[in-house]
Amino acid sequence: MLTQNRAMRAIGVWNWTLPALAARLPDGRTQVTCPAASACAQICYARNGTYRFPAVKARHQANLAFVLDDLPGWESAMIRELSASRFTGKFIRVHDAGDFFDDPYTLAWCRVMRACPDVTFYAYTKEVLRFKRLIEPAPPSNFLWVYSYGGKEDAHIDPSRDRVADVFPDTTAITAAGWSSQEASDLLAVLGPRLVGVPANNIPHFLKRMDGRRLSEWQAEIDADRARKQRRHLRLVPGTSLAVPSPQNLPRPADADRHAA
């Protein structure tokens, strides 16, 4: 179940991978695998290049199907695989693509980690609220993680205390911001300084979308635009802090009758 791509093989790291963002399985089921994704989905490396090859997609879909169809069986199989001597002292990157998409799956990984104390696990995640609720109170001792900007839960990241990663247009921008690049080794994301800069992939249409921004800046623009739209549809009740739909956004009587019919 665990694999190594060329970059990870060079630093001795193994990967576990799901389909990026969402997937439709061969039997027609759909599953969102990155619930908190937002701006990051527009420049996701795992929806580009070799990740789109049919054999690669099929393998990632099979991983997801195993988790969905038999989570206890997947957990046992993962523990058996990680018990092999070749993984002793090694690092496992959980989710080269995908994320901790629900509570049962996240807790299953915690049990795997605790059952394999000679292996170190690490992950980038945008599931900030899930981690602060399920992981931070009592994390497995062999689990390292970094919150990554570009998701719906960016506002819940505290850069003054959390380990955080942000995608920058290039290494020059990382240095100028006073952050530390993980370009030399992906392990620096969890072993290096707490503020982690990730250089953007050199994919022309991705760089064009970034438009010179950090991913956190792009996400902040998305969040601000969403907030403006919500405010336009609400008005405050005088003398209270209650907000109700503005009159122009309420259904007209004819519309209400039509819906009732």
Image (cartoon, grey):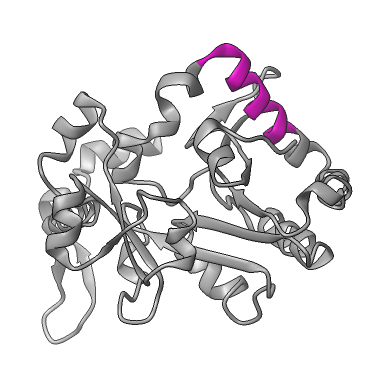
Res. 181 image quadrant: bottom left
- The percent position of residue 10, horizontal first and vertical second, equals 54, 40
Q: Nearer the viewer, residue 50 or 153?
A: 50
At a point 66% along the width and 80% down the height, the residue shown is: 138
Give the residue furthest to the top: 54
Q: Nearer the viewer, residue 124 or 223?
A: 124
User: Considering only vertical position in the picture, is 109 above or below 207?
Assistant: below
At a point 26% along the width and 41% down the height, the residue shown is: 200
Q: Can the viewer see residue 225 in this picture?
A: no
- The percent position of residue 212, horizontal first and vertical second, equals 10, 44
- The percent position of residue 94, horizontal first and vertical second, equals 61, 50
User: Considering only vertical position in the picture, is 35 above or below 141?
Assistant: above
Say whether residue 63 is magenta.
yes
- The percent position of residue 66, horizontal first and vertical second, equals 77, 35
Left or right: 201 as drawn, with respect to 232:
right
At a point 13% along the width and 87% down the height, the residue shown is: 239
- Quadrant containing the C terminus in the rendered view: top left
Range of magenta residues? 53-65
Q: Nearer the viewer, residue 26 or 142?
A: 142
Q: Nearer the viewer, residue 44 or 37?
A: 44
Give the residue furthest to the bottom: 239
Res. 1 image quadrant: top right
User: Considering only vertical position in the picture, is 52 above or below 201?
Assistant: above
Give the number of callouts.
0
Say whether residue 44 is magenta.
no
Q: Can the viewer see residue 25 in this picture?
A: yes
User: Considering only vertical position in the picture, is 111 above or below 208?
Assistant: below
Left or right: 196 as drawn, with respect to 12:
left
Assign the magenta stretch its main secondary structure.
Answer: helix
Left or right: 72 as drawn, with respect to 236:
right
At a point 71% along the width and 27% down the height, the residue shown is: 62
